[in-house]
Structures are given as structure tokens and as C-alpha cells.
Image (cartoon, rainbow, N blue to C red):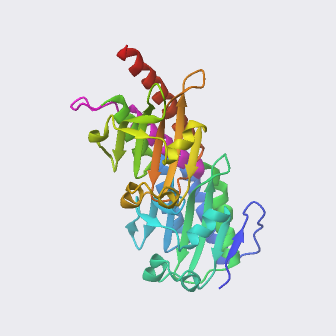
Amino acid sequence: MAIETTNIDDATSPAAPHEAVSSVSAARNDLGLLSSRTGQEFLQTFVDLLQDVIQVDFVAISELRVTDKEVIRVKAGWMDGDSLQNFEYDACFTPCLEAIKSAETVLVYEGVQSSFPNDALLQHKGLESFLGYPVINTYGEVIGLIQLAWRRQTSQEECYQILETINDFADRIATELENLRALRVLQTLARGPDLATSETVFHLITRQIQSLLGVRAVFVAECALPDKTHFDILAYCEAGTCRTELDGTPLSYAGRPCENLQTMEEFRLDSGLADAYPDQSVYPTKGYDSYLGIRADDKNGNALGHLVVFHDGPITTHKLETELLTIFRDRLGFEILQKRSQAK
């Protein structure tokens, strides 16, 4: 079955059947009630109204999980009367991935199960047609997805009417998703060290990065003085837990991806980490497949240390996460200088 991708900015709605026009017109009137809603309440009200007025079998607003374009987390949605909020799933074999990768609307009017036979949700729920609308932020990045699906066939006319309504609210939905993500960042940054433990500021930095990005592991390190052929681990966080037994462990730059940080401010490897560094047995053992390293320098450009992120899939960072990592890099450099000053 053919899959249609559409740039909604260029789309014009053909004449639609009377029923579709009436339903969508009613939806637009009801959606006007959203002006006083914000955040999670706005997203939930939007999908509630779409489901009630358009009579769709599945509707959701989802965000892409940070660092991973192929994992989607539902922020607000319904399926068969059940809330889908915080439901998370892999988009690898779904029409969702088509919309994410193309940054264009995906329409499947019938036979969506046969078009995507490996999508377990489509098969299990008996869905027949699908509409996927990518949510794009002000930087042109796809940060989420609006999804609708039916157990019946749809038409181009009906879907285009719905798309016009969604398009009216697309920028607002993108803003609300960005605001929710920024709020999570602020909440995480507001948490200080656990005073009931011996947690240091370096432990806190790794926990915050690991929590915000949802990656497998994070560590921060200091360049060893004076030869700088080694670095010392300051803190290592894995699955939300700081492995304090690794604090102070000296490691050689040679034979590790961190070696690139001796000459580069940032080094990224999206996949094949274990193959690229076969002597590091910990990578396949832990399932680390990708690497992101960022160097922290002093004001004269001399390397002080670095932060490293490991993950089991590509590490994709949007504008917000990139700026956040820059803040952590600068914080790491400051704390290393403080540590050295106090040691004198």
C-alpha cells in the first residue's frame, strides 16, 4: 500500500465530504478552549478533543527520547479508553520513523498493517490507517510526533482537513514539548549533592547528565599532571548509580576514544565502539556502542579534563542538550580548577 509523505505547509485541502468538514470544524471550535492551558494539561486537552470530535481510535502526542531518535515516549494519548501517558516504544519498524526521518507528514489511508508488518502495536490493535505529523522546534529539529490511527480506511480529503487543524497548533505543541523538557532540566539541575552521603560535586555532575540524557553511563575525568598521558576518573555514573570504587582510577589515553580529546574539543562515535577499540573489553560487556567525549579547557585553552557519555545507540543531541552539555563542560572545568587550588 502506498505511503504518502506531505509537507503540510504546501498542502491544500481538497473538497472534503460533509461529515469530515463538520467534524473538523467542530474540533477547531473546541480547540479554541486551549488558550488557557499550558504544559502537560495543554497536550492532554488537545488529544482529548481530537479523540472526542474526530472519533479516532488512537491519538497521541509523543516526544523523542533524548539521544535516541528511534525511541518515542507518549506525553498524552488514548487507545481504547486507556491512557498512554509515559508509554515508551521503539519506532524502528513503525510509520512513526518515516515521519521522524523525513520531517514530513506520513499518511497511510488503508493497509497500514501490511505496509509495516513488524509494528506490533498496529498488528495487535487491528489498525487500518495512520497519520503521523512531525513536531519541529524553532531550530528545525524534529522533537516529537502527533499520531492518529483508525480501524477503518480514511481518505485524503479527511486527513487533509485534520492536518489543517493540527497545523494551526503545531508551533504551540512544539513550544509546550520544549518547555516540558526545559522544566525537567531545571528540576534536575536544582538538586544538589546528597548530603547524607559522601557524594561530591563530580558525582552530582555525572548523575545529572546521565539522568537528563537517559544514556547508559557517564564519567568525568581530570587530565593527570604533569605528562598528561593519563587521566584520572573523578566520578563514574552507570544506570543512575555512582560507582565510587572507580574514583581516582588512572587510565591511559592510548587505545581509548578519549585519546582524540588530546587534540580535539569534541569526539563522537555513533556506532561500532567495540570494533573501533577491540582492546577495551568493557564496551561489548556493557553493551556500549556509541561514545561522546567533550573536553574542558582553562581560559588559555589548556586541557583540564573531559566528560564522556556512553550509550547503546546513536547519541543524538538537540539544541537544548548541546547547550546543556556546554554548561556541564564549563562547570567541570571550574570544579577541577577549584580542586587543584584547594590541594595547594
Quadrant in which the C terminus is drawn: top left
Quadrant in which the N terminus is drawn: bottom right
Where residue 336 appears, x then y in whole percent?
43, 25
Outermost residue on the left side: it is 196
Residue at coordinates 55% horizontally, 52% vertically from top-left?
33
Looking at the image, is 256 positioned above or below residue 126?
above
Identify the magenta region: 173-199
Residue at coordinates 76% horizontally, 75% vertically from top-left?
15
Note whether residue 17 is visible.
no
Q: Considering depth in this image, is 112 or 79 the residue closer to the camera?
A: 112
Looking at the image, is 62 positioned above or below residue 52?
above
Is residue 169 rendered magenta in the image? no
Where residue 88 appears, x then y in whole percent?
42, 63
Magenta-drawn stretch, dominant element (helix, strand or loop): helix
Looking at the image, is 13 positioned above or below residue 41?
below
Where residue 238 appears, x then y in whole percent?
34, 48
Looking at the image, is 42 positioned above or below residue 193?
below
Q: Quadrant of residue 24?
A: bottom right
